[in-house]
Amino acid sequence: MGFIDTFFRRRSSGTMAKDRLKLVLVSDRASCSPETMEMIKNDIIEVISKYMEIDTQGLDIQITQTETEEGNGNGPALYANIPIKEVRFHR
Amino acid sequence: MSEVIVITSGKGGVGKTTTTANIGTGLAKMGKKVVMIDTDIGLRNLDVVMGLENRIVYNLVDVIEGNCRIKQAMIKDKRYSNLFLLPSAQTRDKSSVSPEQMKKLVDELREEFDYILLDCPAGIEQGFKNAISGADRALIVTTPEVSAIRDADRIIGLLEANDLKRIDLVINRIRMDMVKRGDMMSVEDVIDILAIDLIGVVPDDESIVVATNEGEPLVGKDTQAGKAFENICHRILGEKVPFMEFDVDGIFKKIIGLFKRGY
């Protein structure tokens, strides 16, 4: 508090609270444990690997909030970022 | 037509009982016939907040078990003859009552009262399930803190899962000076996170502590919290009341400020 903080504007604790809450609630609402997320991740790797070679280390999945089209609140969404190494063609 | 409102929060100590006492008193003051039921079996408190602790003879469990009639257990308020309290039992536990029994009791009371307020215990176990079973709508009380909001979110999910569609939010104990400094989440922040309708904002007010000490609800009194609770009552009745602006310095400094500026 006070003089130093006003100069070196720290992130306000109110904003921190809001950001932390948003993250906590996403996983609370999805009721997805880290174990479940790991299982989903492994299954995704297995399925995608049938068709293309992917970077399993760089793969990142998370449940996030998205604005719905109707604009009536946020909906949870499964976000996956899967870097591809090489595409295999099966004909 | 009567309405059954459950006042709940998930987290304890955010002001459910104070809110119930003030809304009950406020609605009675506006001429409605109201009964408040303390459903927190084993930890009763609504009686002391209302200042009616010396008048208890029978309690909720006595009524449920058929030891007395409903009329015998209901305590008439000191201030309003159309306000009643059905106290909880202190020496029993939550399993003494089932959701079905609670619903039956509430439905019986509907015939006589305009509003039936259910003061819900903290938590999401048996006591919570009992309290919500007969309700038409819910008021969620929260404070602008991470723990209270997280629990409120969980409660909202459970209420929706139980098909309780009308859910309104009361933000209690907000400190505008801290919000201004950025050290407390604002009303907008809380609504943004919980995404339900706001029905009232009650500022953190010393007069609440005094009122509880005296066992006198402060709804309608000339304090910020008193006015905030009065506004909530009007909104429950379906009236449109603008949300008041809480000044950091309080109303008196604001008036003096106006004179100083020569308006």
Image (cartoon, helix red, strand yellow):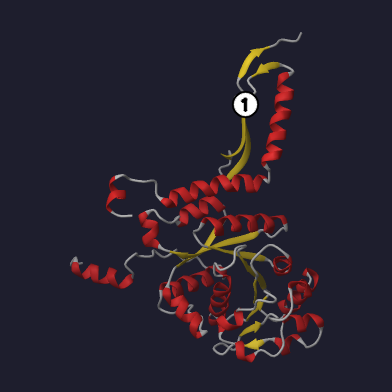
Secondary structure, mark 1, is loop
Chain under numbered label 1? A
Which sits in the foreground, B193 or B23? B193
Report x, y in % for residue B128.
69, 66
Q: Amino acid at mark 1?
A: Leu
Image vertical order of residue B232 relative to residue B217, above or below? above
Report x, y in % for residue B210.
45, 80
Q: Which residue is mark 1?
A: A59
Residue at 60%, 79% (x, y): give it.
B46
Tell me if residue A73 can be seen: no
Tell me if residue B136 can be seen: yes
Report x, y in % for residue B119.
63, 73
Report x, y in % for residue B163.
72, 58
Please state, as top left, top right, bottom left or bottom right, where the C terminus of chain B lies in the image. Answer: bottom left
Residue at 39%, 53% (x, y): give it.
B182
Q: Left or right of B252: which side holds B142?
A: right
